[in-house]
Image (cartoon, rainbow, N blue to C red):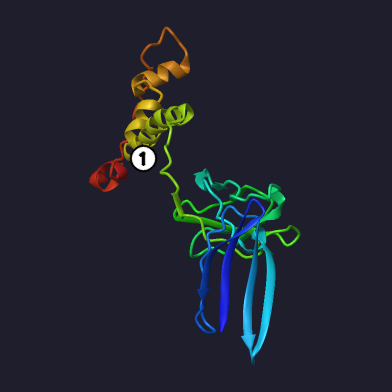
């Protein structure tokens, strides 16, 4: 059997508050020791007809779990995820370097281990998903305090905001100048022959009757002179058989 007595020191006087008979081998008490620096446990135990008295002194900082960090804030700016928090409540630990943190960004992310800091920046955060941020803490092994993890802080959900697009003046000018140029190129392809004749008209030429005059360069002969007509030569041939008498004579 195990008898446990719960007493409290008040002005150097030990005052009995509670005494309980624990359940054999299994059982626990919940004590409100939030404002105490240490606790001394004294219990009597009988074993094999022997009476034993045990006294144990425990520092509250070594047995009191830390509260999770408070005021957890998360925001996405551009492609970065910014997270900040406050120190956990602790009466005897004032050095920020004595706290280790475990940061959870969601189910698909690995836990981040941090020490001695109150902020974290996740580079290249995915803008297409939301983050569920929570954090817990414990005392570093190099400091005097509770070495087990605290409870998780309340979850903070954050998602990337839809970007607001602003019109660049250079883009507006490029659009205003680019659209007419594209339309002009299309018209040139469709009406190539007609536009070619309009943009590049043929060189005018004089009629054929004036071409000779212009090439000769004689101002007195406006019309070209006609070539002289050749006279035809006619040769008469007489047949000798038609005049036999004249041959005999």
Quadrant (top left, top right, bottom left, bottom right) of the C terminus: top left
Q: Is residue 28 visible?
A: no
Q: Position of residue 26 (x, y in %)?
A: 52, 81
* Residue 33 screen position, x and y as percent: 57, 58
Label 1 environment density (alpha carbons within 10 Å; few <14, some 14–19, many ≥20): few
The furthest residue to the right: 142
Q: Who's the residue at 35% across and 38% down the image?
A: 186
The answer to whether residue 243 is left or right of residue 184 is left
Q: Which residue is more in the foreground, 129 or 95?
A: 95
Label 1, on which residue? 189
Q: Is residue 164 above or below residue 199?
A: below
Front-lying residue, 74 or 76: 74
For the residue pair 122 and 66, the one nearer the viewer reads as 66
Quarter of the figure that contains the N terminus: bottom right
Q: Secondary structure at mark 1?
A: helix
5 sits left or right of 131 in the view: right
Q: Give the farthest residue toward the bottom.
A: 48
**Residue 6 horizontal/vertical position (percent):** 57, 66
In this picture, is 162 found above or below 102?
above
- Can residue 127 be seen here? The reply is yes
**Residue 101 appears left or right of 140:** left
In the picture shown, does residue 83 fall above or below 193? below
Kindly give the residue lying farthest to the left in the view shown. 242
Q: Is residue 130 left or right of residue 241?
A: right
């Amino acid at each position: 059997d195990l008898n446990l007595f719960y007493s409290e020191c008040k002005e150097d006087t030990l005052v009995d508050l509670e005494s309980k008979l624990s359940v054999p081998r299994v059982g626990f008490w919940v004590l409100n020791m939030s404002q105490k620096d240490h606790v001394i446990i004294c219990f009597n135990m009988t074993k094999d007809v022997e009476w034993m008295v045990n006294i144990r002194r425990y520092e509250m900082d070594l047995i009191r779990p830390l509260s999770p960090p408070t005021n957890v804030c998360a925001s996405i700016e551009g492609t970065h995820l910014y997270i900040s928090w406050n120190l956990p409540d602790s009466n005897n630990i004032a050095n920020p370097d004595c706290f280790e943190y475990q940061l959870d960004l969601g189910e698909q992310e690995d836990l981040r281990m941090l020490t001695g800091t109150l902020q974290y920046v996740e580079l290249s955060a995915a803008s297409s998903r939301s983050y569920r941020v929570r954090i817990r803490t414990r005392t570093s092994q190099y400091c005097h305090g509770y070495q087990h993890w605290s409870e998780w802080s309340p979850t903070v959900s954050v998602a990337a905001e839809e970007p607001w697009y602003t019109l660049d003046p250079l883009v507006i000018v490029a659009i205003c100048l680019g659209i007419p140029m594209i339309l002009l190129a299309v018209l040139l392809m469709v009406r190539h022959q007609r536009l070619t004749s309009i943009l590049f008209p043929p060189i005018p030429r004089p009629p054929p009757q004036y071409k000779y005059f212009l090439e000769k360069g004689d101002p007195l002969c406006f019309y070209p002179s006609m070539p002289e007509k050749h006279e035809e030569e006619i040769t008469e041939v007489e047949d000798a058989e038609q005049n036999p008498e004249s041959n005999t004579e």
